[in-house]
Image (cartoon, rainbow, N blue to C red):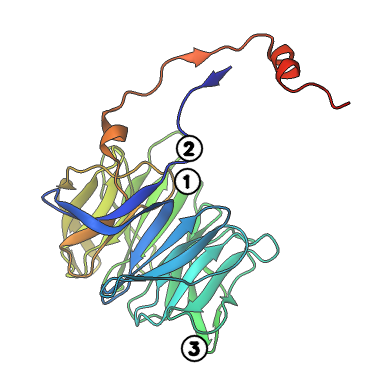
Amino acid sequence: MYLAGKGQEAFPISWLDSAGKTEPLHASIGRYFTPRFSPDGRRLAFAIGGQAEDIWVKDLDRGILSRLSSLPGLNRWPVWTPDGKSIVFQSGNPASPGLYWIRSDGSGEAQRLTDGTLHEFPYSFSPDGKRLAFSGGGDIFTAPVEGDPGHVRLGKPELFLGTPSIEWYPAFSPDGRWLAYASAEPGTLFEVYVRTFPGPGVKWQISTGGGSFPLWSQDGRELLFESLDRRVMAVSYTAKGDSFASGKPRAWSETRLRNLPTISVYDLAPDGKRLAAILADDEATSRKPPTHLTFLLNFFDELRRKVPPAR
């Protein structure tokens, strides 16, 4: 019994503005994941899948694509340091999993930061670059960045939020005083929340009806997230002291993102005007899901007929 459908799909990375206008950003078709802009917006890091998966960086001014990581297994979730000189990423290297640090210009070797026992994946740096926020085992941690550029290490991870719920995607606000994240209790939708940092203190719910992958605009005015129907939503907010007030979520754009569960497929450019986005194509958004199963009877008889035993 089987369900007919496509195999692994390939897709481009696009520019997307709030009016729904799209332009090619990386037009070559491939399997791309977790796009992230450099702090100056002139480079884009993302993972490219295939036999393996590695981190690549595209110079958007020159259109040059360079491979950054070359470790076995799946390597994704690039996070830029605030100075743009380095990137932290998650590696599923079977021999040495964990978080790695590498120079964004490709010089030098990747330095291993963690042993992978928490199944960590990174999401953001504090604005001063002194602390990394990451998820591990369904909880949220931060860790101090220590050492020097040639020999970076992470200090002891500190639990920011550990509850019976699942908490992912911790994003530092531009001023470093708040941490946005997604959380879900068993059997419920993920929603986006905000807490003070170092907190955790009181939580404020931001999304309604489902939300994940929070991102802050650099102007300190909006918090973005991906909705359950794969639109990018925006919420205006004000913060004073330890008080946080957010408005009603609205669609930043009606254009849908590609459905890649648990994987980020968009990032906001530093100027706040456009996204780098992996979009749902017209066929994916308009095509009805398959509704027919195929039953194949006497499968082994047919297999023996087509592939006779070796003599």
Give residue 81's position: percent from left, percent from top: 39, 77
Q: Quadrant of residue 289?
A: top left
Secondary structure under tag 1 reads loop
Cα gap from disc 3 to disc 2, whole angstroms: 41 Å
In the depicted structure, whether residue 212 falls above or below residue 310: below
Q: Quadrant of the C terminus?
A: top right
Cα gap from disc 1 to disc 3, whole angstroms: 36 Å
Looking at the image, can residue 203 be seen?
Answer: no
Q: Which residue is mark 2?
A: 186
Give whichever of 280, 303 is nearer the camera: 303
Q: Label 1 amino acid?
A: Ser
Label of residue 149 in the image: 3
Q: Quadrant of the N terminus?
A: top right
Cα gap from disc 2 to disc 1, whole angstroms: 7 Å
Looking at the image, can residue 126 be seen?
Answer: yes
Q: Does 81 sit left or right of 140 as displayed?
A: left
Q: Quadrant of residue 188?
A: top left
- Local packing at callout 3 (Cα closer than 10 Å; few below 14, some 14-19, many 20+) is few
Give whichever of 228, 254 is nearer the camera: 254
Of the numbered discs 3 and 2, the one sitting upstream in the chain is 3
